[in-house]
Image: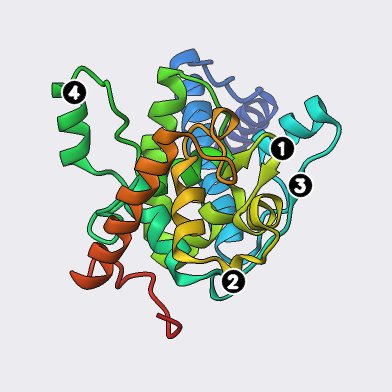
């Protein structure tokens, strides 16, 4: 009897082993969630790599520069380090576009609030935001682009130094149609290198921003002259009150 019982148990065990394993039930929501999370963390990784890369490597071209090169066939651009740019040019750009550059973390909430109260008549984009737009994003007014810009700017601020942000900005900003960067602009308008710009020349270059296609630094309108004079005063002010400390070098 014991032998027969053992034989039956062996047969039952063999039949159990031969039985196929139950198939997992497909759960579409769990599958979708997993892929969404993979894409989300993948996108974060790509963004961090892109930000870290430009923190150390000078971008050879930006999306807007490429677009303009396709349209014009040729653009002018020459990269120079911040140490090769006249300090007064750096101060003039900050005075013109973002006087509190050293005091915010990428988004100037006071300026945004003031712009909203003014009905968005004047801009509230910081130099950091403009750099993010120029290096990584597309031009044109779009809520999607502004949202991405607002998310990416604090990341850039966390990884790059203020000097690096200003250095990249001055090298990719457009100063005339097809003329990108302060070195190309200094040669284009005044026939000098960026290192040799005077206070007046620097203020006039800053005055053409952010509308370089309709303004000239070498043949300034009365508006550009007035704006340049205001920028020159602002550049002197931020040097005196310490708001240029985060990007100032030994040459000041």
How far apart marks 2 and 4 lie (CA) works out to 39 Å
Q: Nearer the viewer, mark 1 or mark 4?
A: 1
Query: Which type of secondary structure does the marked residue at label 1 adopt?
Result: loop
Q: Quadrant of residue 199?
A: bottom left
The answer to which of marks 1 and 4 sits earlier in the sequence is 4
The answer to which of marks 2 and 1 sits earlier in the sequence is 1
How far apart marks 2 and 1 lie (CA) works out to 22 Å
Q: Which residue bears the numbered disc 2?
A: 196
Q: Are marks 2 and 3 in contact (CB under 8 Å)?
A: no
Drawn side of residue 10 relative to residue 45, left or right: right
How far apart marks 3 and 4 lie (CA) works out to 36 Å
Q: Are marks 3 and 1 in contact (CB under 8 Å)?
A: yes
Task: Examine the rendered structure and indicate whether residue 6 appears above or below residue 88.
Answer: above
Drawn side of residue 12 relative to residue 66, left or right: left
On residue 220, which mark appears? none
Q: Which residue bears the numbered disc 4?
A: 116
Q: Which residue bears the numbered disc 1?
A: 178
Query: Which type of secondary structure does the marked residue at label 3 adopt?
Result: strand
Drawn side of residue 124 relative to residue 168, left or right: left
Q: Nearer the viewer, mark 2 or mark 1?
A: 2
- Indicate the position of residue 56 as horizontal and vertical percent values: 60, 67
Where, quadrant-wise, is the N terminus in this rendering?
top right
- Graded by Cα atoms within 10 Å as few (under 14), some (14 to 19) or many (20 or more), the crowding at tag 1 reads many
Q: Nearer the viewer, mark 2 or mark 4?
A: 2
Task: Examine the rendered structure and indicate whether residue 240 appears above or below residue 14.
Answer: below
């Amino acid at each position: 009897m014991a032998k027969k019982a053992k034989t039956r148990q062996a047969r039952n065990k063999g039949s159990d082993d031969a039985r196929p394993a139950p198939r997992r039930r497909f759960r579409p929501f769990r599958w979708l969630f997993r892929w969404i999370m993979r894409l989300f963390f993948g996108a974060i990784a790509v963004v961090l790599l892109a930000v870290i890369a430009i923190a150390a490597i000078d971008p050879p071209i930006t999306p807007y520069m490429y677009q303009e090169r396709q349209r014009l066939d040729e653009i002018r651009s020459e990269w120079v380090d911040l140490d090769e740019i006249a300090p007064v040019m750096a101060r003039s750009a900050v005075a013109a576009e973002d006087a509190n550059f050293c005091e915010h973390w990428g988004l100037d909430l006071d300026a945004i609030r003031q712009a909203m109260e003014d009905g968005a008549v004047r801009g509230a984009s910081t130099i950091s935001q403009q750099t993010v737009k120029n290096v990584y994003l597309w031009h044109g007014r779009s809520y999607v682009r502004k949202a991405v810009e607002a998310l990416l700017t604090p990341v850039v601020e966390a990884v790059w130094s203020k000097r690096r942000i200003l250095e990249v900005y001055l090298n990719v900003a457009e100063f005339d149609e097809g003329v990108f960067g302060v070195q190309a602009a200094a040669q284009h308008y005044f026939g000098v290198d960026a290192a040799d710009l005077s206070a007046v020349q620097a203020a006039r270059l800053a005055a053409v921003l952010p509308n370089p296609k309709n303004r000239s630094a070498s043949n300034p309108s009365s508006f550009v002259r007035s704006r340049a004079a205001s920028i020159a005063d602002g550049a002197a002010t931020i040097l005196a009150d310490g708001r240029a400390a985060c990007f100032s070098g030994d040459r000041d």
